[in-house]
Image (cartoon, rainbow, N blue to C red):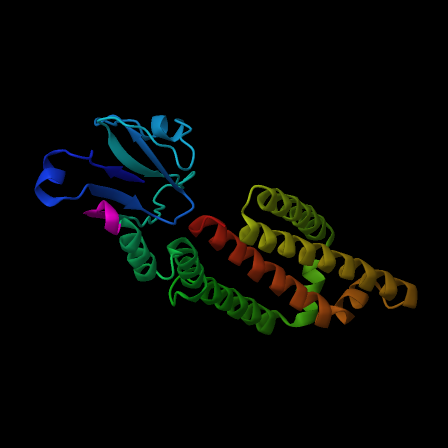
Amino acid sequence: MTATSLPDDGYDAVTGNQVTMLYYSSDSRAVVYTGGFYNSNPYEYDRLGQAKDYVEASDNAIGIVFKAGNLNPGQSVTFSYFTGVAPDSSVADLVKQIGNQSGGGSPDVLRKLQELANTFLDPVNGVFRQISGLASTALDVIGDLGPASVASRLASGALGAFSLVTSAIDYSEGIKEQENGRWLSGGLTTAAGLLGIAGFGGAVVGGAVGFAAGAGIAAGVAAAAPVLVPLAVGAAAIGGAAWLVHTFTPW
């Protein structure tokens, strides 16, 4: 967005140039406009519908607003833009310099990559750190109770039914999140739901095989523990990761 002084005004008479002021951002959430000098409602200027290459001759302000979307309590987002002033003949070179300074003209992409890296690699609250903690806790429980005991408890009637229902809900919610543009948290939630459903199915198959063989349902489920326990741990870890991504990122 640029605003350029008129030809033959006082500045042009002294310098021999028109002067241009500009706002520049390659952030896809940015909206630029020209309008009044007192702009108290940013939503009003998002609705002006000024298309690319819109031009008007007037004594008005120029502005830039960013669409942050819906934010959770305490959540913040970062926007980047540049303001510049230059003779009109130098504006193209100035924009080129800004593009080079901001990383090849794609700060939006770089920002998203940085946020994604922070989401996963932060040593305190990063997804990988949280998954590691969940997995460590699950393994401690398995070590204390034994894999067969854990698998048997996971497959008990009430708990098994609850697990199936919550896994189905996770799967459905993950699909909805992906449809609403939250591809990462939605994909993780869907994956956690599928693992939970697979674990329930594995317990049913194990119990049925044990019953058919005459060893009993509990024995069949216990025999399937090497498969069921990793599925349960994986579902819990991925579900935790999905919650973190949903809570702390827009994805």
Where residue 27 appears, x then y in whole percent?
39, 48
**Residue at the spot 56% in from the left edge and 62% down from the top edge:** 237
Front residue of 209/218: it is 209
Pick the quarter of the image with the N terminus.
top left
Overall secondary structure of the magenta stretch? strand
Q: Is residue 74 left or right of residue 174?
A: left
Q: Nearer the viewer, residue 28 or 49?
A: 49
Report the magenta residues as a range: 83-90
**Residue shown at 72% from the left, 69% from the top:** 227
Instruction: Tell whether 142 sits left or right of 94.
Output: right
Residue 148 x %, y %:
70, 70
Question: In the image, is residue 3 part of the stretch drawn in magenta?
Answer: no
Q: Is residue 179 above or below residue 231?
A: above
Please state which of residues 46 and 86 is positioned toward the viewer in this rendering.
86
**In the depicted structure, whether residue 22 falls above or below residue 150:** above
Residue at the (64%, 62%) spot, across then down = 232
Q: Nearer the viewer, residue 50 or 174?
A: 50
